[in-house]
Image (cartoon, coloured by chain):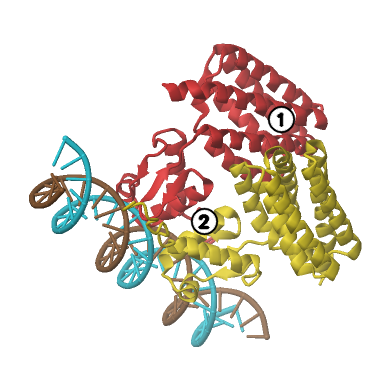
Chain colours: A red, B yellow, C brown, D cyan
Amino acid sequence: MTNTQQVTPIARRPLHEEAADRLRDLIVQGRLTPGERLNERLLSVQLGLSRTPLREAIKVLATEGLVELLPNRGAIVSHMDAVRLSESMVVMGALEALAGELACINATDAQVNEIRALHYEMLAYHARGDLAGYFKFNQAIHLKIVKYSGNTMLFNAYRQLNANVRRARYLANLSRERWDAAVREHDEILAALAARDVKRIKALLSDHLTHKLASVLAALPSRQAA
Amino acid sequence: MTNTQQVTPIARRPLHEEAADRLRDLIVQGRLTPGERLNERLLSVQLGLSRTPLREAIKVLATEGLVELLPNRGAIVSHMDAVRLSESMVVMGALEALAGELACINATDAQVNEIRALHYEMLAYHARGDLAGYFKFNQAIHLKIVKYSGNTMLFNAYRQLNANVRRARYLANLSRERWDAAVREHDEILAALAARDVKRIKALLSDHLTHKLASVLAALPSRQAA
DNA sequence: TTTTTGTATTCTGCATACAAAATGACAAAC
DNA sequence: GTTTGTCATTTTGTATGCAGAATACAAAAA
């Protein structure tokens, strides 16, 4: 039993990945605002690394669309205008519809129940009127549906679009009516999933995203006026 | 009219972008084979730049899924197994169906005619039995349809998946029957687009991708046996 | 012969150094 | 008062240097 010990298989996480994660958080949480410039020197000291891995992270975020690269002028947090937002959500609608379809076929009963559990937790936050908590579980449910489609490429594509859209989630400062409607839609989505009703879940998810988009777009102009 | 001149907007292209493009080509063209290791020092001299911008490019390719990052062991060209391939094509099918729908609505007549021109060029190569030329215009047509959907996010998502799938295009060493059928399908797709028949183009593109996937999957096992 | 172990070499990951471009300040000219 | 030109400073883009991990290889042991 000399060398049989588990030699830490935890290869230290590369700094550029760490940096990418932290930058993503900063952007999605709105700590770095759209249009804001990413000063490399400043960020490198704030994140406690050198410019090299930081730059690698920034390049990754650029391909993900979270930041924009300006030649010789570094990177800025990309703007999230109504056009980009609705474009993204339209694509996500198509992806979720496909995901629902596949999940109906591929998800195990245990996975469906996992989603069901999240659904009830979400209902609890809805009942309390806690929007932030609601959003969190709402997000989790949608992600799980896509994940349990069993299609990794689909999951990755969805994840990437979602990161961009999440930045604007505060815009969906939805009315009570829309909120209640969204919850009802989620009820139906879960029912369709449990019933393995492919046609139905596809239609439901597609409509759900369409409604969400409409809700966000309705809220958008008032924001820009402010 | 003193300063109205076009002040060379051609800011020199950053080396990391140049490197990313060239690496993409090398991978898509199969000059770098799946599983092959990317030696940074070697590649940097071959491409005529230093390791820093090269590494940035590699990180970008990794997020695009063209290469895989192994901790402390650099990057390898990612493998293109049947699972990944079919997963990607399923997603592309959904995206193309959406794109066709949107293109029907948004594309100008001039753009439709541009696609028509590509279609005829493709027919010429088909008539000659020139598979490589056929593929080239086939690709161009599909890309144009997605582009003329007018949805930039959709285009980006599609482009990324496509880069991965193109690497396996030689696998679709299709039979004459399948080839002829594919051409007929393209005829119908173009007709539906010109007729602005949303329902029809959606169904056609979805089926087209399904058939293409089946064709590729059928060709795959024989390849692996060889 | 096969396996193991110690060592040298190669390669990656990261930090730093340097050059070119952009930004900003400030003064001169209109 | 505005504009324009010049210079100092800051910031990005790229190259290079260095430490540690991984790999290859050779010698020793089974």
Circle 2: is it few (<14), some (14-19), or many (20+) Cα within 10 Å? many
Query: Can you say whether B5 is above or below A102 in the image?
Result: below
Name the residue at 62% across, 66% down.
B27
What is the x, y in percent for residue A9? Answer: 53, 55
Name the residue at 63% across, 61% down.
B78
Screen quadrant of the C terminus of chain A:
top left
Q: Amino acid at mark 1?
A: Ser
Q: Which of the pair A89/A119 is nearer the observer?
A: A89
Q: Horizontal placement of A122 versus B47: left or right?
A: right
Circle 1: is it few (<14), some (14-19), or many (20+) Cα within 10 Å? many
Secondary element type, mark 2: helix
Q: Horizontal placement of A144 versus B43: left or right?
A: right
Q: Which of the pair A117/A62 is nearer the observer?
A: A62
Q: Nearer the viewer, mark 1 or mark 2?
A: 1
Which residue is label 1 attached to?
A206
Q: Amino acid at mark 2?
A: Val
What is the x, y in percent for residue A96? Answer: 69, 35
Name the residue at 58% across, 16% down.
A126
Q: Horizontal placement of A196 versus A32: left or right?
A: right
Q: Is residue B76 visible?
A: yes
Which residue is label 2 attached to?
B60
Q: Horizontal placement of A176 versus B114: left or right?
A: left
What is the x, y in percent for residue B92? Answer: 71, 48
Q: Which of the pair A154/B135 is nearer the observer?
A: B135
Query: Can you say whether A209 is above or below A38 in the image?
Result: above
Q: Is residue A152 visible?
A: no
Secondary element type, mark 1: helix
Measured Cα–Cα span from mark 1 to mark 2: 31 Å
